[in-house]
Image (cartoon, helix red, strand yellow):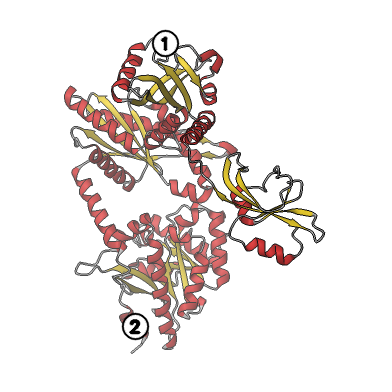
Amino acid sequence: MVRDFATLAAFNRVPAPVFVLAPDGECTYANPVALAVLGCPPSAMALPDGTEGPHQGSHTFHRADGSALNVLLSLSPERLAAGTLEGWIGTWVPQAPHTAAGDLEERLRLAGAIFEHAVEGIMVTDTSGNIVAVNPAFEEITGYSAQASVGKPPPIFGANGADRAAADRIVREVEAAGRWSGEVWSRRRNGEVYPQWVNIGAARDATGATTHHVTLFSDVTALRASELRLEHLSQFDQLTGLPNRALLLVRLERAVAQARHSKTVGAVVFLDIDRFKTINDSLGHAIGDELLKALALRLQARRRAGDTFARLGGDEFVLLVEGLGAAGDAATVAMELADALAEPFMLAGGSTLYASASIGLSVFPEHGIDAAGLVGNAEAAMYQAKKEGRATFRYYTPALTQALHARLEMETRLRGALERAEFLLQYQAKVDIDGKVTGAEALVRWQPQGSAMIPPNHFVPLAEDTGLIVPIGDWVLWAACSEARRWLDAGHPTPVAVNLSNVQFRSKNLVRRIRDILEESGLPPWLLEIEITESAVMESVHEAVAHLQALRELGVRLALDDFGTGFSSLASLKILPLHVLKIDQSFVRGLPDGKSDTQIVRTILTMAENLGLEATAEGVETAAQLALLRELGCRSFQGYLLARPESAAAFGARLGLA
């Protein structure tokens, strides 16, 4: 029939359905339109016998999805030259039934399909309340077969079989309004109780009288479980299973109201795990999470019945204590929690960790009656405990809130200080035994617009806590290297020392960032000295060695700042690739009269010499101190006696720059 590609291509482009039948009625070709409409080639059809000319008439095709398509069919015979019938070329146009009987038949067919294939359970009852028909979904949901259900009352009302009053009320509402919907509890054939969402409608005859009730219902067990899960997620911490901040505040509001009514005392105990960030950074977040879960279990076990132990997030926990006899009893609770943390935590994989907490206490109603305010007051007290050495507790005072507000205000200002170019560098000279300038230490200062200069010891700890020390530290490195490059270009190659915070030193991209800054500024690496504190090195000696070795390979000089205050061992010191030890000013301050300080300084100088390291004494403020240091063999000094921190221009003048 389709004799060549030209004919096939032509049929394929026809925008109407086209198909080809063999003489026996089998389809041998269907174009894309025909296939799209039916979903498959037309099935074999009976053809008119003896027809010589075209044929037209009604026909019903069956689509691939099982539905029927009524059409007006047109067939054209194709014959060979000898007159033998070769087949038929056909097409069609849709033909909708026009009779009322046809409409009714189609509606009944659709209703039957819906009844059989609906995923909701469907049940039809008569006016006596007995079941007339149920669909397969009814059987699947309830466990009752159609045979066991027809002719009997429905099982969906009243999980205990006794709630007929509710069922009668629903029937009355259906009669009055024609429909009802709502949730009911039902019992499956196996005895399981489950929730259903039910829609009931009244079927009425031509006179308006109710003949049947049609009930559609679905099992909403999974939906209710999801809602409970979402409710749990909104009120409980996922990691520890403890109540979260939202649930804590609800319970705290209730506890405050109860305390005011009963004239009793309650407390908010705010715990922050000391140095938890170090655990996360050094051992990984998986170990950190495991420690938090173990800690939560241990502290939860120490709470009294009726108290609430919650996790606010991170390493912050709160214990809500009710029914205390006096405000001082809260201290007993804090000490019990501290004792609970004293025992080591044995974690999976053999890790043994010790933990302590800084604890803040606020008492209600003495320190307030607002839930969020009480938590904030306890947090302020916690920060005070952390500031005073950690592993202790402090009560809230109004002054703590003022300090906290001042801290938040400073943090807000600090976040925009770089953009407003409010930071500047001062340089303090380092001199040798002959008084010659051998280098400078770059010291960052913050000069807010329209305000007094803020000392570094006020804003640097805040910058470290908030992570702002990283961009600030990058700026200090860049500015110091750029200034040292200007000294070099002017014929005065003078090393510049820059302090790295603990946060910067632990950064994984530290070496790359310093390399980039050196390249941007054009400063040779040997003119940059990086100062790190002894405490930063001792947090993780092996990691520190790797960082220091990479920096040394970069060509920069390395100094250990505040030496003598960080409890480093000689075993650790001998493996650190250092160039300089800086003797902490706390030892220099005791010279020349302090015998212990004199002995410590002598020991450090001897040790530095034996290790091949340069020693620099910090904080030299008197001629007597300088004289003794020279006598002890020190050859590098820094302090107010020799030079105070000064601007870049003033330091340049000290070097002899015009």
Against 629, is 320 above or below? above
Could you tell me residue 585's position as x and y percent? 37, 62
Circle 1 packing at 10 Å, graded few (<14), some (14-19), many (20+), is few
Circle 2 packing at 10 Å, graded few (<14), some (14-19), many (20+), is some
Q: Is residue 494 left or right of residue 410?
A: right
Against 418, is 265 above or below? above
Determine which residue is flagged by label 2. Answer: 654
Give me the C-alpha separation between circle 2 and circle 1: 99 Å
Of pointers 2 and 1, the one earlier in the residue sequence: 1
Q: Which residue, as the protein is rendered here, is positioned at the far right?
A: 82
Could you tell me residue 21's position as x and y percent? 72, 51
Amino acid type of disc 2? Arg
Against 317, is 83 above or below? below
Which one is in front, 412 or 381?
A: 412
Which one is in front, 644 or 293?
A: 293
Q: Is residue 643 left or right of residue 490?
A: left
Q: Is residue 311 left or right of residue 450?
A: right
Which one is in front, 51 or 366?
A: 51
Could you tell me residue 54's position as x and y percent? 66, 53
Q: Quadrant of residue 200?
A: top left
Q: Quadrant of the C terminus?
A: bottom left
Q: Which mark is residue 656?
A: none
Determine which residue is flagged by label 1. Answer: 161
Q: Secondary structure at mark 1?
A: loop
Could you tell me residue 24's position as x and y percent? 76, 46
Number of numbered discs on residues: 2
Amino acid type of disc 1? Gly
Q: Secondary structure at mark 2?
A: helix
Q: Is residue 605 visible?
A: yes
* Tag nearer the camera, 2 or 1: 1
